[in-house]
Image (cartoon, rainbow, N blue to C red):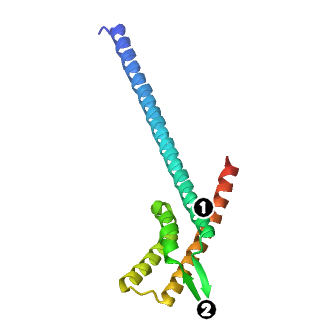
Amino acid sequence: MDINWTVIGTLGGTIVGALSTYFVNKQKLDWDSEQTLRKRNWDQEDIANKEYKENFEKKFDVYNKVMKAHIEEVVVTHRGELRDFDLKVYVMKIRPIIYESFHKIDNDVRILVRQMDSEIDKMNYLEDSEPEWLDYLGQLYSHLIDFIEEKYKQMIDVSIELNKQK
């Protein structure tokens, strides 16, 4: 039996070459997939960070405007034991600021604003503004300002921490 070593060597070399090419290509494909996935994750993080920053800044802006309007306009005054709530000032000055970016503000602030809206709707429906209702709206408004001040302080703390990390 005559063995043709040239044929066996050629076949062996071809098989080794093919396997080497397969493993190198597989390794390269895995590496490329990993890099693509990593880049996609970085891009998603960048987008999320950008959206977070934009929302943060918009919320900060809304809270700034509300606090400025609160200082410039007298919405609640005290008459004896009851508060007097100036509905016109709230509806014309404060409420539009809040609603320009309502979806960006904190949920507990949104709930309180909606609660105030509900009470205002009840007053409008009954066409009666009893002093107790105005007092209750004054209480809700005071809570709203307290919430906004608290959120504002928290946002300043977060902003300081973010700037420290840079």
| Nearer-N-terminus badge (2/1) | 1
Identify residue for label 2: 81
- Disc 2 residue type? Glu
Q: Which quadrant would residue 69 be assigned to in this image?
A: bottom right
Dot 1 amino acid type: Asn
Q: Position of residue 3 (x, y in %)?
A: 32, 10
108 shown above or below 38: below
Instruction: Point out the residue furthest to the bottom here.
Output: 81
Above-or-below relation of 148 to 101:
below
Q: Nearer the viewer, mark 2 or mark 1?
A: 2
Label 2 environment density (alpha carbons within 10 Å; few <14, some 14–19, many ≥20): few
Residue 164 left/right relative to 47: right
Q: In the image, what residue occupies the spot 52% across and 72% down?
A: 89
As helix, strand or loop, the secondary structure at mark 1 comes to: helix
The residue depicted at 51 percent of the width and 89 percent of the height is 131
Foreground pick, 38 / 1? 38
Query: Which x, y percent locates residue 14?
Result: 36, 16
- What mark, if any, has residue 124 been given in the picture? none
Which residue lies most toward the left here? Answer: 1
Total number of numbered discs in the rendering: 2
Q: Please tell me whether mark 2 sits on a helix, a strand or a loop.
A: loop
Give above or below for 45 relative to 104: above
Residue 66, percent from left and from top: 57, 65
Q: Quadrant of residue 151?
A: bottom right
> Measuring 65% from the left and 52% from the top, which residue is drawn there?
162
Q: Which residue is mark 1?
A: 64
Q: Residues within 10 Å of mark 1 (few under 14, many from 20)?
A: some
